[in-house]
């Protein structure tokens, strides 16, 4: 490959596969999923290097073109990539292109797809609070005569429906131990709960 030519996905995979410092290649994003590729889809590729290995491929770190986005990362860094964060979701659903660790790269990706009990409890509490915030804003805007700003569920912002849904969510959340997340909303919970003659 000429020195000045930026690598394509195919040419970089060939280079990386020939380099013993590379222990894994991982493709994420739309190219990793059947039926998701469009004419605008690029290749989002992680090149995972053995810890402490020296390679000339590091010159491509941060490489970004409309066809190829590269992340060059050590194995130790890859183990914690996206932990926590949105990237974790993308990596958990990524496709292994090369795995020189006898399935180790795949196992790292699989581990990113599973939350331990503490992570699951913490994250679900944060999402519950975000849901309560959206619901509160919707019913508050409905109460205050702003129907367009009240649209939160389906296309209508149907407040009685939202309140019935919240009653189910509240019961399940409290059974799961997230009562404190909801109680932090104080008297605003009354606006979110089902009401007679006021919806």
Image (tube, rainbow, N blue to C red):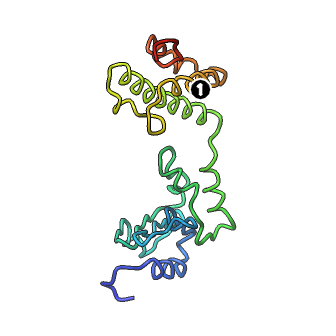
**Quick one: which residue is furthest to the front in this view?**
197
Nearest to the observer: residue 30 or residue 55: 30
**Quick one: which residue is furthest to the left in this view?**
4
User: Residue at horizontal 58%, vertical 18%?
Assistant: 179
Q: Which residue is denoted by mark 1 in the rendering?
A: 169
Residue 199 visible in the displayed image? yes
Residue 52 x/y as whole percent: 50, 64
Horizontal arrangement in the rendering, residue 53 relative to residue 173 (left or right): left
Q: Residues within 10 Å of mark 1 (few under 14, many from 20)?
A: some
Q: Quadrant of residue 151?
A: top left
> Up-down: is 173 above or below 20?
above
> Up-down: is 73 above or below 115?
below
Nearest to the observer: residue 116 or residue 132: 132
User: Residue at horizontal 57%, vertical 68%?
Assistant: 24
Horizontal arrangement in the rendering, residue 59 relative to residue 93 (left or right): left
Residue 89 x/y as whole percent: 53, 50
Nearest to the observer: residue 176 or residue 59: 176
Residue 185 visible in the displayed image? no
Secondary element at image label 1: helix
> Up-down: is 110 above or below 58?
above
> Up-down: is 144 above or below 150?
above
Q: Quadrant of residue 23?
A: bottom right
**Quick one: which residue is furthest to the right in this view?**
102
Nearest to the observer: residue 195 or residue 119: 195
Screen quadrant of the N terminus: bottom left
Residue 29 x/y as whole percent: 49, 62
Horizontal arrangement in the rendering, residue 50 relative to residue 141 (left or right): right
User: Residue at horizontal 65%, vertical 34%?
Assistant: 117
């Amino acid at each position: 490959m000429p020195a000045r030519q930026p690598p394509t996905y195919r040419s970089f995979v060939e280079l990386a596969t020939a380099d013993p410092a590379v222990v894994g290649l991982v493709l994420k994003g739309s190219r990793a999923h059947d039926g998701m590729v469009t004419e605008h889809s690029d290749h989002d590729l992680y090149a995972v290097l053995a810890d402490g290995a020296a390679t000339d491929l590091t010159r491509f770190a941060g490489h970004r073109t409309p066809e190829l986005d590269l992340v060059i990362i050590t194995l130790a860094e890859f183990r914690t990539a996206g932990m926590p964060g949105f990237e974790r979701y993308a990596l958990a659903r990524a496709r292994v292109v090369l795995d020189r660790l006898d399935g180790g790269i795949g196992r790292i990706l699989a581990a990113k797809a599973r939350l331990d009990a503490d992570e699951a409890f913490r994250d679900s509490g944060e999402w519950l609070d975000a849901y309560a915030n959206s619901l509160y804003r919707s019913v508050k805007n409905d109460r205050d005569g702003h129907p367009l700003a009240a649209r939160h569920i389906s296309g209508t912002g149907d407040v009685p429906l939202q309140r019935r849904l919240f009653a189910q969510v509240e019961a399940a959340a409290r059974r799961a131990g997230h009562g404190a997340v909801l109680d932090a909303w104080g008297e605003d919970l009354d606006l979110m709960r089902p009401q007679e003659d006021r919806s």
